[in-house]
Amino acid sequence: MTFGAGSIVSDAHYPAYRKGGTPIAGLYDPDMDKSKRLAHAWNTVAFRSVEEATAVEGVIFDLATPPAAHATVLEALPDGAAVLIQKPMGGNLAAATELLQICR
């Protein structure tokens, strides 16, 4: 389950997942048009909200979001969720510390 529908997802993450045989459970991005295009191109689902996307069970949540959005997504995930944070863990030590506290 991917959060973010930018070029890094379409050009790098999804091709790598396909090559490795990893299924894509869906994606969410606040830009619904971008989400729909990427979902169509990769034969997956574009979820309309963070809540819909976080309700998918048994997946690894791939955060390809700007660091400023990580906390919002992490707080919405179910307890014990497996998460791959693709970008820096915050723009500074305070932000990184906040993310670490959420993860714990």
Image (cartoon, rainbow, N blue to C red):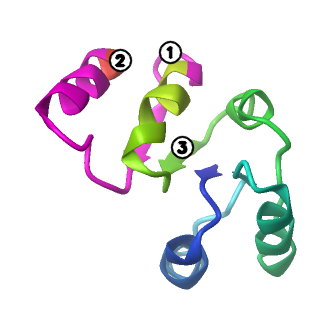
Q: Of circles 2 and 1, which is in front?
A: 2
Within 10 Å of disc 3 (Cα), the crowding (few <14, some 14-19, many 20+) is many
Q: Is residue 54 above or below residue 42?
A: above
Quickly name the residue at label 3.
Answer: 61
Quickly name the residue at label 2.
Answer: 102
Instruction: Tell me where residue 18 sits by quadrant.
Output: bottom right
- Name the secondary structure under disc 3: strand
Residue 91 % position (x, y): 24, 44
Q: Amino acid at mark 2?
A: Ile
Residue 81 % position (x, y): 49, 28
| The one of 70 and 17 positioned closer to us in this rendering | 70
Q: Amino acid at mark 3?
A: Phe
Disc 2/disc 1 C-alpha distance (Å): 10 Å
Is the Cβ of the residue at disc 3 closer than 8 Å to that at disc 2?
no
Asked whether residue 84 is drawn in magenta, I would say yes
The residue sitting at 75% across, 27% down in the picture is 51
Residue 11 % position (x, y): 54, 84
Q: Would residue 38 appear left or right of 78 to someone viewing this image?
A: right
Q: Of circles 3 and 2, which is in front?
A: 2
Tag 2 or tag 3, which sits nearer the N-term? 3
- Name the secondary structure under disc 1: loop
Quickly name the residue at label 1.
Answer: 79
Q: Amino acid at mark 1?
A: Asp
The residue sitting at 53% across, 44% down in the picture is 60
Tag 1 or tag 2, which sits nearer the N-term? 1
Q: Is residue 33 above or below residue 103?
A: below
Q: Which residues are magenta?
A: 76-101
- Name the secondary structure under disc 2: helix
Q: Would residue 65 appear left or right of 37 to someone viewing this image?
A: left
